[in-house]
């Protein structure tokens, strides 16, 4: 058949790296001669047969009754195989090159990955999908892999700890991950180099294997696990990810997806080895009698290139390399990633879908999505999608019978229609719809992958300026990613004749305020819904963190829109965020809030998170060999909306209680600023649309200042973007400052000798490499009537960096750069300590002679453990999930002993920590015999 003859050929892959050399990228995606054979994708070792009824990975989470149950979403039990398209590729003539060249500071090989990694993957995970990348999706260049035999061989990687040895055994014939000699070369398969440990299943846990990786650097990592699959493995193998926020539990069906990397999620870890704060644990608890649990290896992060194809490794992030190299690293045989006799770039095209075919279990509900952009000499723009057909890319639609039988046409129409509708509704009403077409693209060739519906989307034209301007915008990338996710949901709903359920948007206008001694009330508004947005929320969850980066498993609040946390430790800092849930899954989280817990009923300071800008001018400009400077959209290094963490950590050592809110709470009139003595405004790099303030926010701040409230405002752009007559009046009369200029060369600040910061040493402004982000262009400001300079930029004594004004009981301080971007972090604490004194904020004595260190490091929850039920204005559920039974009863009695409450509640939480789990499906199994590799 003709469909067995064609592979995509990209002429650029044969040693010509510049996409602009070709009149049409559609032409560049042609086909190879019909006599080139296609090797069939081999079945996997112990590949299961028949339909599968359980999700491969089920995340467990405690509900309102404290019992753990699987998290459900519209894509639970569904697998999404993701292809970010091209990537760094090796050829003997060009060395390492990108398959598409730099056009208008965009390289398709890299920008497609940004769209998938930072935007599409989170939506899919929140909806419950198993995400299977055909190319690495963790852009983190750090990586650590810990094998079941590590610790004894190479302790520098970490250690593996076993308990319950009578239930743990090995099998010398069973293959698993083994550390290869690096760099990888030839056809070495790392999953054939080692073995793995097995555990006999037990109805209650009697054994566990704990992998404690040596985390190379503090940060967020994708967590992957591997195991050997077999029909008599447990369908509910327990896996726990221990992180600084607590423990996240999963059930894994080990009958599928074994002998490769299986994604659990993305987690925050701190550098080093700590079994309680950074570990992946396999337990032998299972309701599948007679089954076994496999523990092979764990991986954190994506890392950099590991494969040498003759000229050394790429030295690039593995997430930017093409699929050929990932398939080898992920355990696929050479027939998957070396299917042609041509160059690596040609192998890459077929390896994408062949890897999906190899990894996919028959009967597993799944789709294949390939994400690309197009080019045509800058004359055409818009979005088009493709399914497989026998025709060249001539604009026609001739899907094969196999394409139709797989449902690829239905998938493409669902996704494409959603993308076009959403772009027109929220970005450009005239966006061109170039329709769904067919072509004999090798990535879609059903001879390479014939087990699931597959489509390729060309989101926009990367050589057309208007389209490129859109592709560089995070808002556009998020819009497209959400539309693709929604299209996938609608496709499955149509296939199964079920209702469509879409994720809700995040809650809005969140406020966290002290409401009593050791009490904090969190409240929010329901998210908007309908149109291009998600479905209405039906319930909410509040997440807590001791350090602001790693969170607990959340508190289920039902349909209520507030939660009272009680039994908290005064003068400690608590970090919070909120999500909305419904039948579609769980929304992305709100920005992080911070609260300094009070000994009384209120707090004198309010922190306001007012930095939601994320536009193309903030993108990272990264220089790469051959392609030069490229725009990259790494959200964590641009604006991850966690910056009240730095403010909370800086305020923490003072012991001053503080509340916080999102700036949208001011717009909704949910906060009275004159309830506070000081408002600390986190302006970052501004609001969406390059604004410093909303009109409602400016009016609220001006009224508060008129009532005697002090203002400390920081951010680059705060002065620069106050341009209307009303705004310039606010700048001069309320903040007592004026804007002078913006300068990208100013990166260091010196305190003035006679100002509020006198005596402090200089501080640096962060870049994206030093974190939390690149300030880029701070404001140079000058004092107006009655004000003076508190700091200047180094090397320019007249370039104002901080202005100060004090009159009566009110002060106004404006920083021309963000507080959170000041380095070292200890300087932030010193600055805020001085400014609290300058603004006459009373600093309480440390509790019991102790001092909260305020470093912002995450740790086991130290606030609210074993807390009591909320009051009438709370969500009506128990705040903590660690305690149970008599532990809660005792805690309720002990609440009257206020002067001992914090210590006792923490004690009770530690002694009553065994959350229940939902019952599992039971099966009868023949016990696999040792020595047979099962």
Image: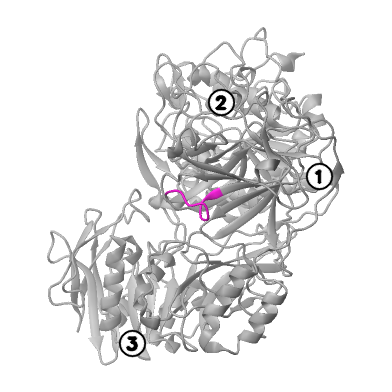
Categorize mark 3 by other alpha carbons within 10 Å: few (<14), some (14-19), many (20+).
few
Q: Secondary structure at mark 1?
A: strand
Quarter where residue 933 is shown: top right
Mark 2 vs mark 3, foreground winner is 2
Determine which of the numbered discs, if any, sits on residue 288 in the image: 1
Q: Is residue 171 magenta?
A: no
Residue 190's disc is 2
In this figure, which residue is indicated by the disc labeled 3?
842
Q: Which residues are magenta?
A: 272-279
Q: Earlier in the sequence, mark 2 or mark 1?
A: 2
Q: Residue at x 71, y 67 (%)?
A: 66
Residue 349 picture location, percent across and down: 59, 24
Looking at the rendered structure, the secondary structure element under dot 3 is loop
Question: Is residue 691 rendered to the left or right of residue 352?
Answer: left
Q: Quadrant of the N terminus?
A: top right
Whether residues under marks 2 and 3 lie with C-beta atoms below 8 angstroms apart, the answer is no
Q: CA distance from mark 2 to mark 1?
A: 30 Å
Q: Which sits earlier in the primary sequence, circle 3 or circle 1?
A: 1
Q: Can residue 813 be seen in this snapshot?
A: no
Q: Answer with left or right where residue 777 lies relative to residue 748.
A: right
**Above/below status of 527 relative to 730:** above
Question: Which marked residue is nearer to the observer: mark 2 or mark 1?
Answer: 1
Which quarter of the figure has residue 413?
top right
């Amino acid at each position: 058949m003709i469909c067995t003859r064609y592979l995509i050929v990209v002429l650029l892959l044969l040693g010509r790296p510049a996409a602009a050399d070709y009149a049409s990228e559609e032409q560049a995606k042609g086909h190879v001669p019909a006599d080139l054979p296609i090797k069939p994708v081999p079945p996997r070792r112990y590949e299961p047969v028949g339909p599968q009824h359980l999700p491969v990975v089920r995340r467990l989470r405690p509900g309102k009754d404290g019992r753990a149950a699987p998290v459900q979403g519209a894509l639970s039990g569904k697998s999404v195989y993701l292809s970010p398209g091209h990537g760094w590729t090796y050829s003997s003539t060009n060395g390492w090159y990108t398959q598409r060249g730099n056009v208008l500071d965009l390289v398709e090989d890299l920008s497609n990955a940004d769209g998938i990694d930072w935007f599409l993957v989170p939506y899919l995970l929140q909806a419950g999908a198993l995400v299977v990348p055909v190319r690495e999706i963790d852009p983190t260049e750090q990586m650590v892999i810990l094998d079941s035999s590590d610790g004894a061989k190479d302790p520098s990687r970490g250690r593996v700890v076993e308990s319950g040895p009578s239930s743990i055994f090995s099998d010398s014939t069973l293959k698993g991950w083994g550390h290869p000699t690096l760099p990888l070369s030839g056809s070495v398969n790392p999953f054939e180099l080692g073995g793995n440990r097995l555990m006999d299943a037990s109805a209650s846990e009697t054994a566990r294997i704990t992998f404690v990786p040596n985390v190379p650097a503090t940060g967020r990592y994708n967590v992957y696990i591997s195991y050997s699959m077999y029909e008599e493995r447990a369908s509910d193998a327990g896996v726990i990810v221990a992180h600084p926020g607590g423990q996240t539990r999963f059930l894994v069906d080990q009958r599928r997806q074994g002998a490769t990397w299986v994604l659990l999620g993305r987690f925050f870890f701190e550098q080093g080895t700590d079994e309680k704060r950074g570990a992946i644990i396999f337990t032998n608890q299972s309701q599948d009698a007679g089954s076994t649990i496999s523990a092979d290896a764990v991986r954190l992060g994506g890392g950099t290139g590991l494969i040498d194809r003759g000229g050394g490794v790429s030295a690039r992030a593995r997430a930017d390399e093409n699929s050929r190299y990932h398939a080898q690293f992920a355990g696929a045989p050479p027939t998957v990633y070396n299917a042609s006799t041509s160059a690596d770039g040609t192998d890459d095209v077929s390896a994408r879908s062949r890897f999906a075919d190899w990894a996919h279990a028959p009967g597993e509900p799944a789709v294949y999505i390939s994400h690309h952009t197009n080019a045509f000499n800058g004359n055409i723009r818009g979005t088009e999608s493709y399914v497989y057909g026998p025709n060249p890319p001539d604009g026609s639609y001739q899907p094969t019978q196999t394409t139709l039988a797989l449902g690829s046409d239905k998938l493409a129409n669902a996704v494409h229609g959603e993308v076009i509708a959403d772009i027109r509704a929220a970005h450009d009403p005239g966006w061109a719809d170039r329709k769904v077409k067919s072509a004999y693209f090798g990535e879609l060739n059903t001879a390479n992958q014939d087990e699931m519906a597959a489509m390729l989307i060309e989101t926009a034209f990367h050589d057309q300026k208007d389209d490129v301007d859109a592709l560089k915008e995070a808002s556009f990338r998020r819009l497209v990613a959400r539309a693709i996710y929604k299209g996938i949901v609608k496709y499955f709903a149509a296939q199964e004749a079920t209702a469509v359920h879409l994720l809700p948007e995040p809650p809005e206008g969140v406020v966290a305020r002290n409401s009593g001694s050791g009490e904090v009330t969190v409240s929010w508004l329901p998210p908007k819904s309908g149109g291009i947005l998600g479905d209405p929320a039906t319930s909410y969850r509040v997440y807590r963190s001791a350090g602001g980066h790693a969170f607990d498993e959340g508190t289920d609040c039902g349909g209520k829109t507030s939660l009272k946390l009680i039994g908290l430790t005064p003068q400690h800092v608590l970090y919070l965020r909120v999500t909305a849930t419904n039948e579609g899954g769980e929304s992305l989280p709100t920005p992080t809030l911070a609260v300094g817990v009070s000994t009384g009923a209120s707090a004198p300071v309010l922190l306001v998170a007012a930095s939601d800008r994320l536009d193309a001018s903030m993108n990272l400009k990264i220089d790469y060999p051959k392609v030069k400077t490229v725009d990259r959209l790494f959200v964590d290094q641009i604006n991850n909306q966690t910056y009240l963490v730095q403010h909370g950590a800086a305020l923490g050592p003072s012991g001053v209680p503080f509340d916080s809110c999102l700036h949208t709470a001011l717009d909704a009139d949910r906060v009275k600023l004159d309830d506070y003595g000081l408002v600390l405004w986190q302006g970052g790099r501004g609001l969406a649309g390059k604004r410093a303030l909303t009109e409602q926010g400016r009016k609220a701040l001006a009224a508060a200042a008129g009532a005697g409230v002090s203002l400390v405002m920081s951010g680059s752009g705060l002065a620069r973007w106050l341009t209307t007559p009303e705004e310039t009046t606010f700048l001069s009369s309320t903040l007592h400052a004026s804007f002078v200029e913006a300068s990208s060369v100013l990166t260091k600040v010196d305190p003035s000798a006679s100002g509020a910061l006198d005596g402090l040493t200089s501080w640096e402004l962060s870049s994206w490499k030093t974190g939390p982000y690149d300030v880029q262009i701070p404001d140079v400001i000058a004092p107006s009537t009655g004000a003076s300079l508190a700091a200047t930029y180094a090397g320019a004594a007249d370039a104002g960096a901080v202005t100060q004004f004090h009159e009566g009981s009110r002060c106004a301080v404006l920083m021309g750069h963000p507080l959170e971007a000041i380095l070292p972090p200890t300087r932030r604490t010193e600055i805020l300590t001085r400014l609290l004194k300058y603004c006459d904020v009373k600093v309480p004595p440390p509790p019991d002679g102790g001092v909260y260190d305020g470093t912002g490091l995450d740790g086991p929850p130290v606030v609210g453990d074993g807390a009591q039920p909320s009051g009438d204005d709370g969500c009506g559920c128990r705040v903590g999930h660690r305690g149970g039974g008599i532990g809660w009863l005792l805690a309720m009695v002990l609440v009257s002993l206020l002067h001992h409450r914090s210590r006792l509640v923490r004690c009770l939480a530690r002694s009553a920590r065994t959350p229940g789990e939902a019952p599992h499906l039971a099966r009868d199994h023949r016990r696999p015999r040792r020595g047979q590799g099962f």
